[in-house]
Amino acid sequence: MGRVLDEMKAFFDSDDWNTTELEEVPNVLRMGFRGDDAEWRCYAQANEQREIFLFYSVAQLKVPDGRRVAVAEFLTRANYGMLIGNFEMDVNDGEVRFKTSVDVEGTTLGLPLARRIVYANVMTMDRYLGGIMGVAFGGLEPREAIARIEMT
């Protein structure tokens, strides 16, 4: 194990997250999260070579091919001005995720920093997931979906 992975595990243990190490992908932990209206998978990754901690929330949906352009517009609108993290969509299969990360080269990850990175991530996914679903499956227009979310 490496330093970043050890620090990552220390955070999740201290915060009572139920994690599973992925055997097929080194330095990655998988866990679930329940937001206000949905559940999704999360992945914590330690890039030991570059000393980076990455955290992903992955929506439990695949955007249909015919709605990917609209969801891409929604995600671009959501990302604009976002201070911590960004949304990503795999245009090949429609997977949507939110990523936060921090470079810890020359320092430690530490529990307070890990907590900020992880909780900023899941709270952002929770805030925007309904809009993603509305655009992907409900025919909602991206501009309207963003306006509903960001006005609250």
Image (cartoon, rainbow, N blue to C red):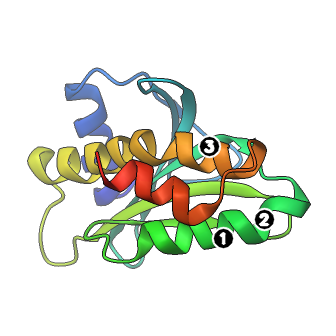
Kind of element beneath mark 1 = helix
Closest to the camera, between mark 2 and mark 3, is 2
Q: CA distance from mark 1 to mark 2?
A: 6 Å
In the rendered view, would you say 82 is above or below 3? below
Q: Residue at coordinates 14% horizontally, 54% vertically from top-left? A: 113
Q: Residue 86, percent across and down?
A: 44, 68
Question: Marks 2 and 3: CB-CB under 8 Å?
Answer: no
In the rendered view, would you say 114 is above or below 41? below
Q: Residue at coordinates 43% horizontally, 21% vertically from top-left? A: 18
Q: Which mark is residue 72?
A: 1
Q: Residue 135, percent across and down?
A: 68, 52
Residue 8 vs residue 3, the one in the foreground: 8
Q: Which residue is mark 3?
A: 59
| Left-right relation of 39 to 92 | left
Closest to the camera, between mark 3 and mark 1, is 1
Q: Which mark is residue 40?
A: none
Q: CA distance from mark 3 to mark 1?
A: 14 Å
Res 90 visible:
no
Q: Residue at coordinates 72% horizontally, 55% vertically from top-left? A: 95
* Label 1: how many Cα within 10 Å (few below 14, some 14–19, many 20+): many
**Which quarter of the rendering shows the C terminus?**
top left
Q: Which residue is mark 2?
A: 68
Kind of residue at badge 1: Ala
Residue 149 vs residue 11, the one in the foreground: 149
| Left-right relation of 85 to 16 | right
Residue 15 vs residue 37, the one in the foreground: 37
* Label 2: how many Cα within 10 Å (few below 14, some 14–19, many 20+): many
Kind of element beneath mark 3 = strand
